[in-house]
Amino acid sequence: MRKLTLGDLKLQEKRLMLENNPSDLRTIPRSRQVPFQKRFFDLFMRFSSFRQQQMQNPALYIVLLIIVTRLLFIFFTDWGLDFEWYVEKVRSILAGGRLYVDVETTHMPLTDFLYVAMYFLNPWKSNVFALRFFLKLPFLLSDVGIAIVVMKIIEQAFQNESTERVFLDVTLSKRVRQAKFSAGLFIAFGLPLLLQTGGGRYDSLFIFCLVIAVFSLQKGQFFAVGLFASLGTSVKYIGVLFLPFVIVWLKKKDILPFLVGFLVGLIPIYPFLLFIPHEFINVVFMRTDHIAYGFSLWHGIYILWNGFMMKHVESIGDTYNIADEPFFIRNFYLPFFIFLFSVIFIFYLKKNWENIRTKKVSQMPILYQVNLVFLPFFIFALTFKAINIQVLAWFLPYIALHRKKGLLIEYSFLTIIHGFALLIFEAPQIDDFLMKATKAVGSNSFFFFLIVKPVVFLANFPSQIFVGIIFLTIFWF
């Protein structure tokens, strides 16, 4: 007997819906004078029918939501200093400057390639709205890709769980759609991802590579694992962090596809590694000279060490001015990362060696595969010197795939707290902040009492509040 698939279940569910609802409102002739209640009920039923049709394909619904929500932010927001800095670098490159030689940048090559390509394709370079749209478009598409892949992972997980069944319950198809829809909604409305994409940050492309890596592990496709690990590295240099946890799962037949995929994904890096290796490698290692900043453990320690005096950054150059940092922050944070990573990796091997030796990674539960990819980035978030709010966006797929209400609430709460912290941190002149906030939302509005008043109160203790939030974040990680 043939095993039912999810597609069969969808067709069966549609037949049941028709049997239970044989009448079609569209076939009922209307009189010229239909009561208002009837027209309202008819409209409601049509809307309900439309919603049911959309739920048959949650991916389409989520994609439309992502496009709409991102467009609302893309045209009217920038990411502080960063976006203007990106545009300046792009113009320098198009004017003939050589990346990493004449044009100073802290990006990996693929990021700058995308900014240059989209700026070049923009036919209205003097129009600020067109400029924002074109330069941010790849990251809007990355958000769409993240949502689609997350929903594919969930569908595949349900399919894998049902492999032992001969007869599948019709409700399984509905459960799959609901799970995909809820995870997709979280991706669509997750504030860290929404804000960093709207502001023009490039982390979405990096996150997309991570979720593709999870999906590839789920399917046992190691060429794709290697490819997207190295592509992620071409976007953000830490993209390969999870590979030690994956390489131990490689069987003999997986080694060649993995290596080929990995080498192909590094194509954006080769020209710089071969022809200007010194300049390129200096840029990669320059990241280790970043100041302790944002929501990092080391920034909290720095503020405590400095007598609760906070450092405010006025330019990109300020983020690499480490002259006044204590020696133990400059010298110990990298060994601490290596130590913690090594300890967790050894513990992981010890706990999972029997599974590694006898099973394929594609046979493991989906949450195991998710943890395999994302665990190293939690370690990074715990130990790196500069952790900005966009780092929260890295873990949005992790939360969506776990589909636990408590974890979702914690994550959302932490996002809101970070928002308050940034308001306090970025507004040292509280009178100026109060004037601008009052002009924006009014002095007696709901938002004034919900956001502005608490910020004004907390701004009297900015350093103490910020340090507390840093350690709360580290504890959550």
Image (tube, grey):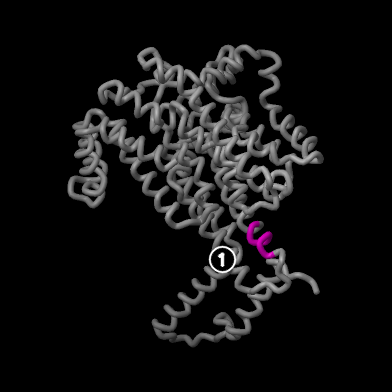
Asked whether residue 121 appears in the rendered view, the answer is no
Across and down, in percent, residue 261 comes to: 74, 35
Residue at horizontal 57 percent and vertical 80 percent from the top: 26
Q: How many marks are shown on the rendered structure? A: 1
**In the image, which residues are magenta?**
157-162
Across and down, in percent, residue 34 comes to: 44, 85
Circle 1 residues within 10 Å: few <14, some 14–19, many ≥20 = some
**Image-based side of 301 in relation to 140, left or right:** left
Image quarter for residue 209?
Answer: top right
- The residue where tag 1 is placed is 55
Quarter that holds the N terminus? bottom right
Image height of 441 relative to 315, above or below: below
**Image-based side of 460 in relation to 275, left or right:** left
Residue at horizontal 59 percent and vertical 47 percent from the top: 370
Q: Nearer the viewer, residue 24 or 314?
A: 314
Across and down, in percent, residue 102 comes to: 57, 12
